[in-house]
């Protein structure tokens, strides 16, 4: 099988080596076979932007315009000055200024432009022109405006990735510059600030759009799957130069590869005979049968030597000790329950089977208490590769009872999902303590009927992290399947999984990508939970993205906009309670977008609380 130490011997671009190593460590059974950087086309249009500047009309100017609108015949400047008790020269200077700006005619009548100024209470000042660059990137589904042109990349250093892209990602539509307010907001032009007296009056293209290039990183991945041929285990991941995942490209590459439209040799100089090594390895089913489980535990403990301490003997579980300890029979459930009771943030359990003898009323009450105190519980189960073939399915009543446990905010607090195809028996608490061994956590009580079960309890940071990444990867994959089914309940469970595993940013990307805007208030509920639990720091980036998106997407009278604004106000209120300084700064940074959502007044009252 592939070894982690093989990375430097594979066709992996040196600049991508560290990222490849991290990818390989995230999921057990995943191998990065190759990684290479390419270039792909984007469209850039240089434009000249005309910006009009305005200021608020002053009281004297307003009075002069009003006088010459309403008094007929128009009084002489001297008469108006005497009536107002003002110096004639002072009033004449003000009138001359209005004439120069075209608001007042020489015969002292208000012009059409003067009528507009009087109605809007704004006076035009000098306009300016500036240069901007519109960049359309179909691969990343974005159109943005920059003050500077794209940085040129070396064509000789990066091969053109265009042949691997679907046609719709290479056919650039023409730029259209219709200066509607909605269009200007979508472009997010930095020089268009109506509230500050700067309005874009015109945008003129300078020449034809030009073709430019950006970098893209492609990773070839191998997932160990016993029932598939090696070539069927190949998938791809794609990332932008900023490290953003590009799922559309990855899916397209995988589809093309399965259809044999290209080879790994042409894509990344990978010798495909390397895959044949996988055919010689023993199957997972052979390695993980009941008769070898205890041997696997002992082998694992040998790997952790010399930190491992055997036997445990009266030692307490301390998540920060950085040790590995062996537990046997009656010790196992005691340690398991103690770890659950001490949980503060998150519990992940994988048990092939779940029954009512173990998950009894007492255990359900324990889970309810944990959820009410802010602990998220994710339970995976299943041993078969196909859910319909499970012989020992979870009783429907028990499944419903667990899923009915809700947080104080009324969202699912216990996520129970079939993951299948695994004989693993693992528990991870707060990403600090990892239990693994032969104990069936939710279908067997070793303290009642001991039969020689063995489990190791590990608090070594690197080892716990490996187990955590593996299990979270399986749950996230399940979330993708739930999301693809598109029923509201399954989509909500998918969002819970992502957010409970601290992937709020990915959840926002899914909402935008698939236009499931009706679930945005639910995401905001989950964000509020995270803030209440003291996790506000990681919420700010996805929350900022969501606010900007919503502020430009929904119309003023859209009922969903009102629902989103209400939920968002609650999130900001809790953020203010958690960290006032952070909240004020965040609100200030997003003030324009929040105002477009109708939250300006509400936020002001929030800040004063």
Image (tube, rainbow, N blue to C red):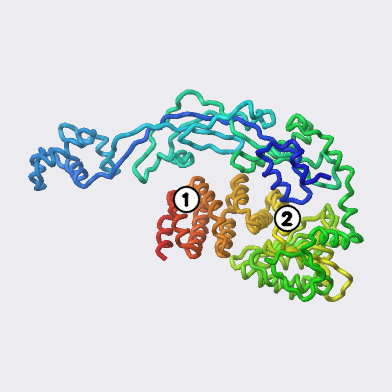
Which quarter shows the C terminus? bottom left
Which numbered disc, 1 or 2, marks the residue closer to the eye? 2
Residue 61's disc is none
User: What x and y, as percent, mark residue 90?
Assistant: 12, 41
Q: Quadrant of residue 245?
A: top right
Count of numbered tags: 2
Q: Is residue 426 left or right of residue 184?
A: right
Q: Residue furthest right?
A: 291
User: What x and y, as percent, mark residue 223?
Assistant: 78, 45
Q: Say which residue appears at 77% left-offset and 76% top-offset.
A: 314
Q: Is residue 295 above or below residue 122?
A: below
Nearer-N-terminus badge (1/2)? 2
Marks 1 and 2, how far apart at CA: 49 Å
Q: Can residue 547 be seen in the rendering of this structure?
A: yes
Contact, CB < 8 Å: mark 1 with mark 2? no
User: What x and y, as percent, mark residue 418?
Assistant: 77, 57
Q: Is residue 575 above or below residue 279?
A: below
Of residue 182 and residue 456, the one placed in the foreground of this image is 456
Task: Tell me the residue that label 1 is attached to.
Answer: 557
Q: Can residue 261 be seen in the rendering of this structure?
A: no
Q: Say which residue appears at 83% left-offset and 52% top-offset.
A: 385
Q: Quadrant of residue 306?
A: bottom right
**Secondary structure type for disc 2:** helix
Of residue 474 and residue 315, the one placed in the foreground of this image is 315
Which quarter shows the N terminus? top right
**Secondary structure type for disc 1:** loop
Task: Tell me the residue that label 2 is attached to.
Answer: 466
Q: Quadrant of residue 54?
A: top left
């Amino acid at each position: 099988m592939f070894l982690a130490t093989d990375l430097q011997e594979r066709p992996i671009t040196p600049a991508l080596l560290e990222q490849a190593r991290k990818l390989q460590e995230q999921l057990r059974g995943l191998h990065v076979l190759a990684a290479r950087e390419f270039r792909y086309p984007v469209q850039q249009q240089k434009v000249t932007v005309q910006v009009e500047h305005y200021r608020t009309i002053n009281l004297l100017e307003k009075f002069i315009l009003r006088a010459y609108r309403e008094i007929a015949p128009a009084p002489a400047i001297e008469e108006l000055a005497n009536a107002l008790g003002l110096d004639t020269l002072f009033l004449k200077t003000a009138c001359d200024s209005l004439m120069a700006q075209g608001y007042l005619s020489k015969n002292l009548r208000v012009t059409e432009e003067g009528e507009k100024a009087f109605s809007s209470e704004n006076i035009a000042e000098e306009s300016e022109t500036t240069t901007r660059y519109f960049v359309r990137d179909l691969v990343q589904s974005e159109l943005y405006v920059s003050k500077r042109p794209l940085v040129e990349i070396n064509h000789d250093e990066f091969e053109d990735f265009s042949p691997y892209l679907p046609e719709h990602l290479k056919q650039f539509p023409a730029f259209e510059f219709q200066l509607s307010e909605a269009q200007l907001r979508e472009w997010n032009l930095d020089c268009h600030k109506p509230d500050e007296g700067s309005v874009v009056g015109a945008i003129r293209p300078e020449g034809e759009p030009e073709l430019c290039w950006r970098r893209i990183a492609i990773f070839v991945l191998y997932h160990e799957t016993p029932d598939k041929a090696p070539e069927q285990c190949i998938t791809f991941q794609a990332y932008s130069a900023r490290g953003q995942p590009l799922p559309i490209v990855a899916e397209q590459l995988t589809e093309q590869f399965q259809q044999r439209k290209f080879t790994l040799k042409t894509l990344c100089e990978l010798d495909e005979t390397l895959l044949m090594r996988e055919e010689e390895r023993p199957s997972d089913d052979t390695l993980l049968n009941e008769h070898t489980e205890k041997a696997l535990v002992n082998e694992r403990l040998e790997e952790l030597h010399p930190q491992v301490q055997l036997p445990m003997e009266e030692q307490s579980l301390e998540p920060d000790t950085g040790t590995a300890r062996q537990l046997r029979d009656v010790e196992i459930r005691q340690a398991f329950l103690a770890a659950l009771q001490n949980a503060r943030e998150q519990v992940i359990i994988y048990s092939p089977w779940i029954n009512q003898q173990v998950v009894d009323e007492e255990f359900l009450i324990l889970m309810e208490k944990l959820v009410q105190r802010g602990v998220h519980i994710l339970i995976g189960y299943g041993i078969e590769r196909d859910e319909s073939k499970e012989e020992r399915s979870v009783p429907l009543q028990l499944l419903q009872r667990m899923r009915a446990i809700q947080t104080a905010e009324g969202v699912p607090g216990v996520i129970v999902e079939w993951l299948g195809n695994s004989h693993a028996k693992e528990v991870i608490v707060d990403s600090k303590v990892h239990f693994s061994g032969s104990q069936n956590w939710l279908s067997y009580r070793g303290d009642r009927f001991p039969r020689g079960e063995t489990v190791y309890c590990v608090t070594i940071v690197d080892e716990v992290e490996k187990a955590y990444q593996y299990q979270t990867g399986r749950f996230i994959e399940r979330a993708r399947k739930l999301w693809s089914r598109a029923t509201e309940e399954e989509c909500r469970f998918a969002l819970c999984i992502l957010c409970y595993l601290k992937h709020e940013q990915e959840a926002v990307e899914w909402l935008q990508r698939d236009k499931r805007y009706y679930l945005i208030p639910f995401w905001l509920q989950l964000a509020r939970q995270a803030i209440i639990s003291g996790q506000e720091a990681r919420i700010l980036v996805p929350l900022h993205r969501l606010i900007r998106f919503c502020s430009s997407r929904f119309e003023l009278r859209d009922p969903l906009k009102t629902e989103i604004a209400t939920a968002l106000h609650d999130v900001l209120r809790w953020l203010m309670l958690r960290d006032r300084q952070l909240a004020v700064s965040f609100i200030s940074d997003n003030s324009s977008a929040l105002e477009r959502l109708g939250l300006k007044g509400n936020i002001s009252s929030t800040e004063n609380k």
